[in-house]
Image: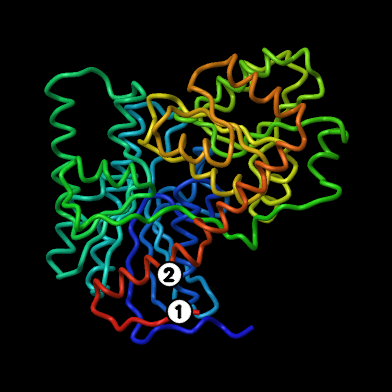
């Protein structure tokens, strides 16, 4: 197959953010895929980032914590990655997380300066973390480079909403004021759901500068399968067993304690098996909490080439979200769940973005309600026809709304308009 054709002249992009490939979950996965998409279509892309460390909170083998490293990726050698020194805490708490973010914000300034001196057509800053915004904005203005901030998580709202930011008062008001000031300085701002775009507006970003840029899924890489599944075989799951899968980051925002409590409530239903796959700061604590539950099984974080098989080992995907995280973050793992064609049960309040998706193509229960989530899972476990119907509805939703080319073509059109390039079709 011939390489995708570039639009000439192709905009040169600079992407600046903490997380990047080969991280397998969350922001790093999407930022890496975005850069790859542009590079495959002939655009020159530079990424200033850190060594991969998430969600294990440990720098991956082959990378160094306290050194600059450069990589060139892609068949056309036009994706250039510069990794900057990063301090990674052994136990991520509020204070250590702040130092962690600050270490990247400071160490990346020389790399960012060098990249902006080459005058890209557009710099996109990925949030988290907003720590990098002051230097990014100052240097971009010095070199006349247009700026775009893309918000995957509202980290300040999440910090206070999830109880990680301390008390109330003037200090909190000051943090919000600084966040709003920084967001307003960018030429454009985007986020991943309509509700999160509205939050940008509420924080003072002009509406005509706001863009909806949702997360996506590669429908050719994640798709429904039938027949034997290696993960089910390895876990000893029989044809009559119903696998309830959570796969992804295991942090504080996910509210995975609820899944352990539901497993406890359903332990008298041994054919309903809970499979938790992934890594993160809360994994050890959660695993300890599941001690003695024979219906809970654990898997490590899986490589990308096994993601589809993992997602297809599920009969039901479970997606918990804490009530205080509503519309502050949108679970990135949702796209893969939908594309896999398996039923989804999640927790979300009425009127939230996640709640709207679940009401349309899944089953929704109130956040924190153990009995309701247990009842929804038990009901679906006994109803294969409903599981099949929900899975098909989820796949159709992914095909209509979340296909990677559909999302990225819309972003490209906006970038072409911003940079004054001629419009065209990228194949």
Residue 268: x and y, percent?
A: 78, 12
Q: Which residue is found at the position 32% from the left and 41% from the top?
A: 101
Q: Residues within 10 Å of mark 1 (few under 14, many from 20)?
A: some
Q: How is the image coloured?
A: rainbow
Residue 138: x and y, percent?
A: 14, 58
Answer whether labels 1 and 2 touch (C-beta < 8 Å): yes
Residue 209 in which image quadrant = bottom left
Q: Estimate the spatial distance between the alpha carbons at disc 1 and disc 2, rounded to whole Å.
A: 8 Å
Q: Looking at the picture, tell me which residue is in the foreground, 426 or 389.
A: 389
Q: Earlier in the sequence, mark 1 or mark 2?
A: 2
Describe the element under mark 2 as helix, strand or loop: helix
Q: Which residue is found at the position 39% from the left and 26% from the top?
A: 93
Q: Looking at the picture, tell me which residue is in the foreground, 86 or 149.
A: 149
Q: Which residue is found at the position 30% from the left and 53% from the top?
A: 190
Q: Residues within 10 Å of mark 2 (few under 14, many from 20)?
A: some
Q: Which mark is residue 393?
A: none
Residue 17: x and y, percent?
A: 35, 53
Residue 335 in the figure: left or right of residue 11? right
Q: Which mark is residue 426?
A: 1
Q: Classify the position of the N terminus by image quarter.
A: bottom right
Residue 255: x and y, percent?
A: 50, 25
Position of residue 425 relative to residue 169, above or below, is below
Residue 37 in the figure: left or right of residue 339? left
Reading the image, the residue beneath label 2 is 409
Residue 336 in the figure: left or right of residue 164? right
Residue 71 in the figure: left or right of residue 180? right
Q: Which residue is found at the position 14% from the left and 28% from the top?
A: 173
Q: How many marks?
A: 2
Residue 97 in which image quadrant = top left
């Amino acid at each position: 197959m011939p390489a995708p054709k570039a639009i000439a002249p192709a905009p040169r992009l600079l992407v600046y953010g903490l997380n990047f490939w080969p991280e397998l979950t969350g922001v790093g996965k999407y930022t890496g895929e975005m850069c790859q998409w542009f590079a495959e279509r002939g655009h020159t892309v530079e990424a200033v980032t850190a060594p991969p460390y998430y969600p294990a909170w440990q720098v991956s083998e082959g990378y160094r914590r306290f050194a600059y490293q450069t990589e060139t990726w892609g068949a056309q050698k036009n994706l250039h990655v510069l990794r900057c020194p990063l301090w990674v805490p052994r136990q991520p708490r509020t204070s250590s997380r702040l130092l962690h973010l600050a270490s990247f914000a400071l160490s990346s300034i020389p790399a960012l300066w060098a990249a902006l001196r080459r005058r890209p057509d557009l710099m996109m800053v990925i949030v988290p973390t907003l720590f990098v915004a002051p230097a990014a904005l100052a240097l971009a203005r010095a070199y006349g480079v247009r700026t775009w901030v893309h918000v995957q998580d509202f980290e300040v709202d999440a910090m206070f909403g999830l109880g990680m930011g301390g008390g109330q008062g003037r200090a909190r008001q000051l943090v919000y004021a600084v966040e709003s000031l920084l967001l307003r300085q960018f030429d454009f701002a985007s986020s991943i759901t309509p509700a999160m775009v509205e939050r940008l507006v509420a924080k003072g970003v002009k509406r005509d500068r706001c863009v909806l840029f949702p997360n996506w899924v590669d429908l050719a890489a994640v798709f429904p399968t039938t027949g034997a599944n290696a993960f089910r075989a390895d876990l000893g799951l029989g044809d009559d067993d119903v696998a309830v899968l959570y796969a992804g980051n295991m942090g504080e925002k996910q509210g995975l304690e609820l899944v352990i409590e539901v497993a406890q409530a359903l332990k008298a239903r041994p054919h309903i098996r809970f499979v938790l796959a992934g890594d993160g700061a809360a994994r050890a604590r959660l695993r300890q909490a599941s001690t003695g539950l024979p219906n809970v099984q654990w898997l490590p974080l899986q490589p990308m080439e096994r993601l589809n098989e993992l997602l297809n080992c599920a009969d039901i995907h479970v997606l918990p979200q804490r009530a205080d995280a509503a519309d502050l973050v949108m679970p990135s793992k949702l796209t893969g769940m939908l594309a896999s064609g398996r039923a989804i049960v999640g927790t979300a309040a009425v009127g939230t973005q996640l709640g709207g998706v679940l009401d349309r193509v899944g089953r929704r229960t109130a956040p924190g309600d153990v009995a309701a989530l247990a009842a929804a899972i038990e009901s679906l476990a006994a109803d294969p026809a409903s599981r099949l119907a929900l899975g098909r509805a989820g796949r159709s939703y992914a095909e209509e709304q979340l296909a990677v080319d559909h999302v990225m073509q819309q972003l490209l059109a906006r970038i072409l308009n911003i940079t004054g390039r001629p419009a065209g079709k990228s194949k």
